C-alpha cells in the first residue's frame, strides 16, 4: 500500500480543476468539464475518510474539534478572500441588480448554503438566461461541508461499535457506506428525472460521490495487495472514464443521475489504482511536477476562475477560446499567490494551530468579518439603484420649452407608452421610485399559492381564487405568459364575481403542441399530461370564460412522429395549428374562449440594463424581437381560426416600433419576455376594456 503523500492525487486534483476551468472558459471540446466537480467530491471523500479512519485506528476515537479546526484552516481563508474580492469586483463592474444578487449569494455562501439558495432560486446550471452569479460555484463547497456535518459524527459512532463488535473500523464502515451510496445514487437517478435543478445542487443526490471516495479509503489496505499491473489497468480505465464524460457530456446531459456514475467511478478507480500501480500506469504523469503544482493550487484556482470569467465577461463580453484562456492564465497566477500567501500561512500559523479551539474559531471570525462588509456593499448598491428623477407623464417627458406638443393617443394607457418613448429620446432621467424596485425584479412573479403545477405531476389540486362566492367561473390556461396576467385577472374576478382557476405551468403553452425540454433531451411528457388535464378540468367546470396565454418554447416541439422539430417556419405553423386545435377542444365546454396576445419580447434584460452605471432610458429602449412577433401572430391567427376572441397587447408596451423598459414609473417587464406584476396590475382596467368580463 502506498503511504504518505500521494503525488498522483495532486495530479488528479489538477485534472479536475482544469476540466472545470476549460468548460467554463469555453476552451476546446471539454463541454462536459463540469464533471471535474464530481472528481473533487470523490477525492475529498477519500482523503477525509483516510484521515478519520487512521485517527480512529490509532486513538480509538476521532476528535470532532480537531477535524473541524483542520477544515476551517483549509477552507475558510481562501474562500473568504475570494468571496470579498468578488463582491468588490461585482460592485465595480456588474450592474446594480447583478451586484445585489451577488451580495445575497455571498451571505448564503458564508454559511455554506449556496446550493440551497440556488435551488430556491431555481437556477439551472446549464440554462441560465441571465448572467450567472459570480459566486455560483460555491455550491460545491456547500455540498461538501453539509456532508461533513454528518460523516465525522458517523465515524465517531462507528468507533463505539468497534469496541463492542471487536472488528476493525474499516470493516464496520463498509456496509454503512454501501448503504449511503445505494440510497443516494437511487435518489439522484429519481430526482434528476423529475427535477434536474434540485438534483444538481442537492447534498442528498451528491452524497454517494463523497461516500464512494470514503469507501475506497476504507478498502485501500485490501486493494493495495492486488497486482500492480491490475491496478495500473484500473487507473487507465478510470482516467478514460473521466475523459469520456468530459468530452461526451454537455448541457443536454441529464446530470447527475446515471450519467454521474461514469466520472465518479472513474475517479475512484484512479484513486485506488494509485495504491500500487505498475510503472506503466498514469500515476507518473499525474505526479509530474508542473501538474502537481496545479494540483497544489487547485482549490484557489477553482475559487478564482469563475468570478474572474464573469467579471471579465461584464467588461469585454463572454470569454471563450483565446480570451477564455487569458482569463484562466490570470486566475492561475492569482491562485499561485493565494496558495503561497493565504492557504499555506493559515495552515501553518502557530497562533491558529496551537490549539484546536483556535482553528474552530475561524468560523465565527469569518462571519463577523464578512457580514458587516457585505452590509456596507449592499448599501452602496441600493444607493445606486434608488437614484433617479420623477415619473414620466404625458405632461412631463423631457420636452424642451417651445417643442411642439405631440398628438398622443386618446387612450391614456397608450399615450403613456408614447410619452415614455419620447422621454427616452429626450434624455429624461430614469425615475427614482420604480415599480417594482430594480432589486425586486428577480422575485417579481404572480403568486399561485399551493397550485405551483410545475412541481406537481400527480393529484393536482384546484385553487379557487378571485371572488369568494362568485356566481361565474373563469379559467386561465397556459405557461408563464399566461401566469403574468394573474394579477389583473384576479382583481377582475373579485370585481365581477368570478371564481377563478389559474391552470398554469411554466414551459407548457396553451397551444396544443408538446414542447421540447430545455435541456434538449426529449419532449416534455409532463407538459403534455398537464395540457390534457387542464382541458379535462374545463370540461368539468364548464366555465363562463377561458383565457389563454402562451409563448413558444425556444427548444422546439415534438413532431407527429416523435422527432425534434427546430425549423422556424415549421414551428410557427405548428404553433398556430396547435392553438386552433386547443380552442376547438375547449370551446364546447366554455361560454367564451379568449387568447391574450403576447407583447413583443425585448432584446435584452431590462433589470440589468437599467442598473448599469451608465444606464439611460434611451440605452434601455428595445425593438421587438422579430421571432417572438412571428410566434405571437401565428397564435393570433390560430385562435381566430378556431373561433376564439383575441386581445391585442402590443400597444401597451411599444409605440412606433420601440419598446421602453420604463413606462411612466413602471418597469413593464421583469425580464426580456414577462410582464411585471406591478405593470399587470396597472393594466387591469385597460385589460377589462378588451375582455369585457363585467358584461
Image (cartoon, rainbow, N blue to C red):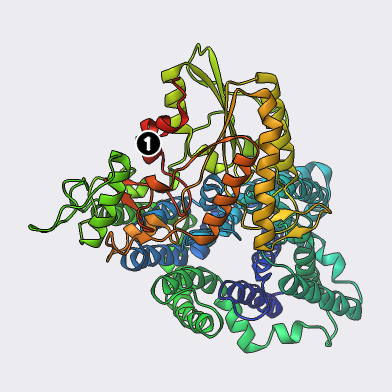
Q: Quadrant of the N terminus?
A: bottom right
The local crowd at label 1, few if under 14, some if 14 to 19, many if 20 or more residues have their Cα within 10 Å, is: some
- Pick whichever, 357 or 11, lies toward us: 11
- Which residue appears at 52% of the width and 65% of the height? 74
Residue 215 in the image, given as x and y percentages of width and height = 78, 58
Q: Is residue 1 visible?
A: no
Residue placed farthest to the left in the image? Answer: 401
Residue 354 in the image, given as x and y percentages of width and height = 45, 63
- Which residue appears at 57% of the width and 77% of the height? 296
- Pick whichever, 418 or 317, lies toward us: 418
Residue 322 in the image, given as x and y percentages of width and height = 53, 85
Q: Is 114 situated left or right of 406 in this image?
A: right
Residue bearing the label numbered 1: 683
Question: Dividing the picture into quarters, in which one does residue 549 lie?
Answer: top right
Image label count: 1
- Which residue appears at 47% of the width and 42% of the height? 648
Q: Quadrant of the C terminus?
A: top left
Q: Is 680 situated left or right of 611 in this image?
A: right
Task: Label 1: state its secondary structure.
Answer: loop
Q: Is 350 situated left or right of 458 in this image?
A: left
Residue 309 in the image, given as x and y percentages of width and height = 48, 73
Q: Is 95 situated left or right of 541 in this image?
A: left
Q: Is residue 158 visible?
A: yes
- Pick whichever, 196 or 489, lies toward us: 489
| Image: 284 above or below 155 | below
| Image: 153 above or below 12 | above
- Pick whichever, 90 or 499, lies toward us: 499
Amino acid at each position: 500500500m502506498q503511504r504518505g503523500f500521494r503525488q498522483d492525487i495532486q495530479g488528479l486534483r489538477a485534472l479536475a480543476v482544469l476540466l472545470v476551468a476549460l468548460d467554463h472558459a469555453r476552451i476546446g471540446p471539454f463541454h462536459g468539464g463540469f464533471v471535474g466537480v464530481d472528481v473533487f467530491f470523490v477525492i475529498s471523500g477519500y482523503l477525509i475518510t483516510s484521515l478519520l479512519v487512521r485517527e480512529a485506528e490509532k486513538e480509538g476515537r476521532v476528535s470532532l474539534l480537531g477535524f473541524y479546526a483542520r477544515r476551517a484552516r483549509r477552507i475558510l481563508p481562501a474562500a473568504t478572500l475570494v468571496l470579498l474580492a468578488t463582491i468588490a469586483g461585482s460592485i465595480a463592474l456588474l450592474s446594480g441588480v447583478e451586484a445585489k444578487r451577488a451580495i445575497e449569494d455571498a451571505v448564503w455562501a458564508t454559511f455554506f448554503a449556496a446550493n440551497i439558495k440556488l435551488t430556491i432560486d431555481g437556477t439551472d446550471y446549464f440554462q441560465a438566461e441571465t448572467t450567472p452569479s459570480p459566486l455560483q460555484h460555491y455550491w460545491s463547497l456547500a455540498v461538501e461541508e453539509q456532508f461533513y456535518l454528518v460523516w465525522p459524527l458517523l465515524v465517531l459512532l462507528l468507533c463505539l461499535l468497534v469496541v463492542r463488535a471487536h472488528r476493525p473500523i474499516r470493516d464496520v464502515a463498509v456496509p454503512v457506506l454501501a448503504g449511503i451510496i445505494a440510497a443516494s445514487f437511487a435518489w439522484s437517478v429519481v430526482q434528476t428525472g423529475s427535477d434536474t435543478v434540485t438534483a444538481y445542487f442537492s447534498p442528498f443526490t451528491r452524497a454517494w460521490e463523497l461516500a464512494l471516495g470514503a469507501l475506497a479509503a476504507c478498502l485501500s489496505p485490501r486493494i493495495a495487495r492486488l497486482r500492480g499491473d491490475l491496478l495500473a489497468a484500473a487507473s487507465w480505465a478510470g482516467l478514460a472514464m473521466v475523459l469520456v464524460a468530459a468530452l461526451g457530456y454537455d448541457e443536454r446531459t441529464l446530470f447527475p443521475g446515471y450519467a454521474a456514475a461514469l466520472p465518479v467511478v472513474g475517479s475512484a478507480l484512479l484513486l485506488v489504482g494509485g495504491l500500487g500501480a505498475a510503472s506503466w500506469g498514469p500515476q507518473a504523469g499525474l505526479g509530474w511536477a508542473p501538474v502537481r503544482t496545479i494540483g497544489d493550487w487547485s482549490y484557489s484556482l477553482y475559487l478564482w476562475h469563475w468570478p474572474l470569467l464573469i467579471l471579465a465577461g461584464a467588461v469585454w463580453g463572454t470569454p471563450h477560446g483565446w480570451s477564455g484562456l487569458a482569463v484562466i492564465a490570470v486566475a492561475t497566477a492569482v491562485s499561485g499567490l493565494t496558495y503561497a500567501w493565504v492557504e499555506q500561512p493559515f495552515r501553518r500559523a502557530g497562533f491558529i494551530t496551537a490549539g484546536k479551539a483556535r482553528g474552530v474559531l475561524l468560523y465565527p471570525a469569518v462571519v463577523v468579518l464578512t457580514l458587516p462588509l457585505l452590509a456596507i456593499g449592499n448599501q452602496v448598491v441600493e444607493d445606486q439603484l434608488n437614484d433617479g428623477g420623477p415619473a414620466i407623464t404625458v405632461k412631463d417627458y423631457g420636452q424642451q420649452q417651445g417643442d411642439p406638443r405631440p398628438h398622443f393617443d386618446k387612450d391614456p394607457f397608450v399615450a403613456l407608452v408614447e410619452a415614455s418613448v419620447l422621454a427616452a429620446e429626450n434624455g429624461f432621467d430614469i425615475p427614482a421610485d420604480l415599480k417594482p424596485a430594480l432589486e425586486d425584479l428577480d422575485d417579481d412573479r404572480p403568486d399561485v399559492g399551493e397550485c405551483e403545477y410545475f412541481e406537481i405531476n400527480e393529484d393536482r389540486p384546484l385553487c379557487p381564487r378571485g371572488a369568494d362566492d362568485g356566481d361565474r367561473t373563469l379559467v386561465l390556461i397556459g405557461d408563464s405568459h399566461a401566469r403574468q396576467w394573474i394579477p389583473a385577472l384576479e382583481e377582475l374576478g373579485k370585481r365581477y364575481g368570478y371564481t377563478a382557476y389559474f391552470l398554469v405551468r411554466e414551459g407548457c403553452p396553451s397551444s396544443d403542441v408538446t414542447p421540447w425540454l430545455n435541456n434538449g433531451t426529449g419532449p416534455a411528457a409532463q407538459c403534455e399530461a398537464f395540457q390534457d388535464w387542464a382541458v379535462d378540468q374545463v370540461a368539468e367546470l364548464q366555465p363562463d370564460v377561458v383565457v389563454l396565454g402562451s409563448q413558444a418554447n425556444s427548444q422546439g416541439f415534438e413532431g407527429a412522429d416523435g422527432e425534434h422539430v427546430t425549423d422556424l417556419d415549421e414551428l410557427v405553423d405548428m404553433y398556430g395549428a396547435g392553438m386552433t386545435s386547443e380552442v376547438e377542444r375547449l370551446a364546447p365546454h366554455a361560454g367564451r374562449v379568449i387568447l391574450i396576445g403576447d407583447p413583443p419580447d425585448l432584446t435584452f434584460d431590462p433589470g440589468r440594463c437599467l442598473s448599469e452605471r451608465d444606464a439611460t432610458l434611451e440605452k434601455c429602449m428595445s425593438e421587438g424581437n422579430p421571432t417572438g412577433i412571428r410566434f405571437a401572430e401565428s397564435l393570433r391567427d390560430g385562435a381566430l381560426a378556431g373561433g376564439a376572441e383575441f386581445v391585442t397587447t402590443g400597444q401597451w408596451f411599444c409605440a412606433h416600433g420601440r419598446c421602453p423598459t420604463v413606462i411612466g414609473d413602471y418597469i413593464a417587464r421583469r425580464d426580456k419576455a414577462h410582464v411585471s406584476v406591478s405593470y399587470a396590475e396597472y393594466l387591469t382596467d385597460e385589460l377589462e376594456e378588451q375582455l369585457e368580463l363585467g358584461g
